[in-house]
Image: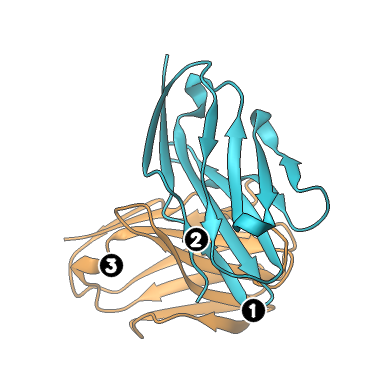
């Protein structure tokens, strides 16, 4: 079965710090990759997705992610975080053989 | 103009009761889902329907029964509620089938508390 690992359960940063959240998946074939964000008390929203083409994808709110096939990774980055980025971030993966599998999430707390 | 709407937002009930959660999407999507998010925020798929047909049924107790009267609606009925059913239940929809590359659009969730 496919699995998704998010390395950090909690990340605490000050405003303007740079962010990188790790995501690794287990399936070796063609995959579709997603990052979702869940603000406190809200539903999940799509930040960005990758399924082909340029492995560096840009999403909403200044987020980007890089797909590195050799490392089975899809890390999320933002050069300068804001207090409003405080949220839970979920990496998710599916393929032609498996439905969307979510990582366990990373809680990001940005202090003003 | 909510794309995926589910009701109720909060549901508090006693063990043994039967309850339903309703979900509707106005995006014209073919596929709908129910996800369960536990207290540790872990999201796990429960069911998926494509054009009213059940296509994914994960290892969920048969006390949980989804019903899709049409492709815009997917309701979840839960019989004989147990304490362990307490969680946030999210409805979602997507344009393509579950193994495609269309992202999921989520509803606002239903926080179920079983006492």
Q: Marks 3/2: CA distance? A: 24 Å
What residue would you read off at disc 2? Answer: A4
In this rendering, does residue B105 appear at all? no
Residue A26's place in the image compared with A10, above or below, is below
Residues marked 3 and 2 touching at CB (< 8 Å)? no
Quadrant for the C terminus of chain A in the image: top left
Indicate the secondary structure of the residue bearing disc 1. loop
Mark 2 vs 1, N-terminal side: 2
What residue would you read off at disc 3? Answer: B85
Q: Which chain is cyan?
A: A
Indicate the secondary structure of the residue bearing disc 2. strand
Give residue B48's position: percent from left, percent from top.
57, 75
The residue sitting at 69% across, 78% down in the picture is: B51
User: Which tint is chain B?
Assistant: orange
Residue B42's place in the image compared with B45, above or below, is above
Residue A20's place in the image compared with B13, above or below, is above
The foreground one among A92 and B18 is A92
- How is the rendered protein coloured? by chain
Residue B19 lies left or right of residue B74; in this view the side is: left
Which chain does the residue under circle 3 lie in? Answer: B
Q: Are marks 2 and 1 on the same chain?
A: yes
The residue sitting at 65% across, 51% down in the picture is: B3
The foreground one among B12 and B62 is B62
Which disc is residue A97 wearing? 1
Q: Nearer the viewer, mark 1 or mark 3?
A: 1
The residue sitting at 68% across, 65% down in the picture is: A31
Residues marked 2 and 1 touching at CB (< 8 Å)? no
Tell me the crowding category of disc 1: few under 14, some 14 to 19, or many 20 or more residues within 10 angstroms, Cα based: some
Give residue B38's position: percent from left, percent from top.
33, 58
Give residue B49's position: percent from left, percent from top.
60, 77
Q: Marks 2/1: CA distance? A: 15 Å
Which chain does the residue under circle 2 lie in? Answer: A
């Amino acid at each position: 079965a496919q699995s998704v690992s998010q390395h950090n359960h909690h990340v605490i940063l000050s405003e303007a710090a740079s962010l990188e959240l790790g995501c690794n998946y287990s399936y070796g074939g063609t995959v579709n990759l997603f990052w979702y964000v869940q603000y406190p008390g809200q539903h999940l929203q799509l930040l960005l997705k990758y399924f082909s083409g340029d492995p560096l994808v840009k999403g909403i709110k200044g987020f980007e992610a890089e797909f590195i096939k050799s490392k089975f990774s899809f890390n999320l980055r933002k050069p300068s975080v804001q207090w409003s980025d405080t949220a839970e971030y979920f990496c998710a993966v599916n393929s032609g053989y498996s439905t969307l599998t979510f990582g366990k999430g990373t809680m990001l707390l940005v202090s003003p | 103009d909510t794309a995926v709407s589910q009701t109720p937002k909060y549901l508090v009930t006693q063990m043994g009761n039967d309850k339903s959660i309703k979900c509707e999407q106005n995006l014209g999507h073919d596929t709908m889902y129910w996800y369960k998010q536990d207290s540790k925020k872990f999201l796990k798929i429960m069911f998926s329907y494509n054009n009213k047909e059940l296509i994914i049924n994960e290892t969920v107790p048969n006390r949980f029964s989804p019903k899709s009267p049409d492709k815009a609606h997917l309701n979840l009925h839960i019989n004989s509620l147990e304490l362990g059913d307490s969680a946030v239940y999210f409805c979602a929809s997507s344009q393509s089938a579950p193994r495609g590359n269309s992202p999921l659009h989520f509803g606002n969730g239903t926080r179920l508390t079983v006492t």
